[in-house]
Image (spheres, rainbow, N blue to C red):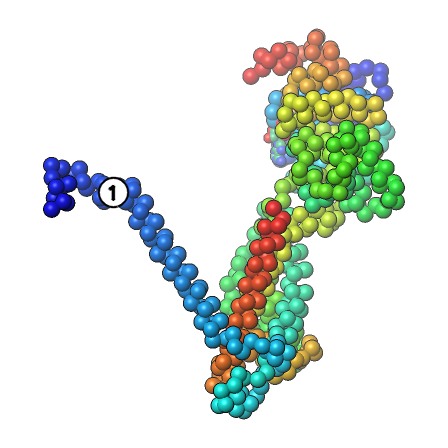
Amino acid sequence: MNQTNILAGKKVTELIPDLFSGRKLKDRLFLIGIVIFSLLTISMVVLIIGSMILKGYHQINWAFFTQSPPDTFQAMMAKMSGKTIPGGIINGITGSLYLVGIASLIAIPFGVLIGIYLYENSKKKYAGFIRDITDVLQGVPSIVIGLIVYLWVVVEITHGYSVLAGSVALAIMMLPLIIRSTEESLKMIPDTLKEAAIALGTPYYKVVMRVLIPSSFSGLMTGILLAISRILGETAPLMLTTLGNPAINWNIAKPVSAVPLLIWQFYNDPNMVDLIWSSSLFLMGFVLLLNILSKWIAARQK
Amino acid sequence: MNDINTQPSILTIENLSIAYDKDKLAVKNVSATIKKNAITAIMGPSGCGKTTLLRAMNRMHELYPNISTTGQIRLYDENIYDMSTIKLRRKIGMVFQRPNPFPTLSIYDNVIAGYKLNGIKLKRSERDEIVETSLKNVTLWDEVKNSLHKKGNFLSGGQQQRLCIARALAFKPDVILLDEPTSALDPIATAKIEDLLIDLKENYSIVLVTHNMSQAARISDNAMYMYMGELIEYDETTKIFTNPKETSTQNYITGRFG
Ligand SMILES: Nc1ncnc2c1ncn2[C@@H]1O[C@H](COP(=O)(O)OP(=O)(O)O)[C@@H](O)[C@H]1O
Ligand SMILES: [Mg+2]
């Protein structure tokens, strides 16, 4: 009744623009769309993190950070008597840190130097070529990198799965990220700063080491931390290069474990399934921490 | 030889031509002598080659990749194109259009940045002495003496520019080159820097690029007028402003310029 009253006396043509092409309506639809999609995204993240915490928290204890995983029999016994699985993932934690450490030692100097080269010679053909190669490298599937490193390092150098091989594979994956972030953060430095240093009679390499790098330090750190968090979860290339190790290993020529490798092993052992969640929780927490750290460094500089 | 008076010279520019790209000359066959303990202004419309000429005096123009330079510039009797750029730039310091202190360094370290960046070790007392004298020279000491070890980002534009002048003075150079140093500053900060430059010429020779004619008239002793890369006229400032020889200069001075 009411509605007919409001509409009465108005022509259809007067109403149409308001309903269908009015700016307000479009704005509102757009807003509703944004809200729906962001809620979807947020709930996805909450679901992932939530299920990981719910399923993983009770395994996280002192042993988790200090002991290697149990064998499948021990795990089965614990499971049958309703206890938490004994042992932990210390071999994976130390292995991941070792691999990432060596990979960083390889990738950071190379990546930063190439980034500096690209920044300094940005308009040269050769620089464009390197930039293209970097993009290609970034697109190579990690399993392919694993295969190649298997052929180069596992077969030729360490004659077996090794920390070195795994680190080289991870380093190759870090390289394009570090090159790009180095170049981008150097581009943010105003030219005037470089000129100021040069006008003080500073030799070129000292301008790089003492002005350019410190001035872009937060950008460099952010790029490095993001590269590290990207490779922390890599599994496929590690299967082909470091294999895994039931115990802690510090020998660079021998196989080593890593948290994502352990997750894969736990997945394949029905008795160990509970450890998947705690390990995933740990890995995710670590990556999250690195992300927060890099955001904090970036914000602090401003 | 383009010598304007009998005062002693410090820089001698002879037949200097500079091209960014093969054919396009930014500076055309310029010859002039820069006088010691004087302020020399370089005036002219935008794009006439002032910055290029100034930067040629401590070879900063060589940073551009395809630049070619002919002719010579002598510091006293030494051809600067035979000197190492490192040694040259310590003798001929430079201040830029926009203040550019190093944001990662403290005020103190900014003043001695030239030493720090070059890895020249100084005794604590020497450092303190250089920092204090340089900052006093630019009348910044009283304003910053209690925050020497803070970063300089809270300083005003004018204070930052004076800090940059102090940084150039710390090497005790013979010549200071300034490229429109006040164009980003308000009138009060500008006046402070102008007063400062007049004080500094007691001990230094100053070359100042400015597109502000009244600034050239106020503080320079000698002035060059450039147009399209050529040095049209160079004389004592009073003569340039009261009795220019060239009509082109006259047009520029009287504002009848396009
Ligand atoms: N980096 C550069 N590359 C090519 N040409 C340039 C460059 N810098 C300046 N020029 C050209 O050289 C001429 C002189 O420039 P400049 O010395 O900056 O003049 P001014 O300082 O008087 O404005 C101009 O024609 C300008 O276009
Ligand atoms: Mg200029």
Instruction: Using the image as rendered, state which of residue B203 and residue B80 is in the foreground.
Output: B203
Q: Quadrant of ligand 1?
A: top right
**Residue type pointed to by label 1:** Ser
Instruction: Using the image as rendered, state which of residue B25 and residue A115 is in the foreground.
Output: A115
Position of residue A191 measured from the top left corner of the image (x, y, whole percent): 64, 41
Mark 1 neighbour density, 10 Å: few (under 14) some (14–19) many (20 or more) = few
Q: Looking at the image, which residue is at 64% across and 20% down?
A: B212
Q: Is residue B233 left or right of residue A239?
A: right
- Is residue B82 at least partly visible in the picture? no
Q: Is residue A194 left or right of residue B115?
A: left
Identify the image quadrant of residue B112.
Answer: top right
Chain to which the residue tagged by mark 1 belongs: A
Q: Residue furthest top?
A: B243
Q: Is residue A39 left or right of residue A168?
A: left
Q: Looking at the image, which residue is at 66% across and 80% down?
A: A248
Task: Find numbered disc 1 in the image and state the secondary structure of the residue it sits on.
Answer: helix
Identify the image quadrant of residue B230.
Answer: top right
Vertical arrangement, residue A77 with respect to residue A216, above or below = below
Instruction: Using the image as rendered, state which of residue B225 and residue A164 is in the foreground.
Output: A164
- Is residue A273 at least partly visible in the picture? yes
Q: Looking at the image, which residue is at 66% across and 56% down?
A: A113
Position of residue B156 measured from the top left corner of the image (x, y, whole percent): 66, 32
Vertical arrangement, residue A228 with respect to residue A297, above or below = below
Position of residue A289 measured from the top left corner of the image (x, y, whole percent): 57, 63
Instruction: Count how many numbered circles sit on residues in the image.
Output: 1
Q: Which residue is labeled 1 in the image?
A: A21
Q: Looking at the image, which residue is at 53% across and 68% down?
A: A284
Position of residue B138 measured from the top left corner of the image (x, y, whole percent): 77, 29
Vertical arrangement, residue A171 with respect to residue B16, above or below = below
Vertical arrangement, residue A243 with respect to residue B200, above or below = below
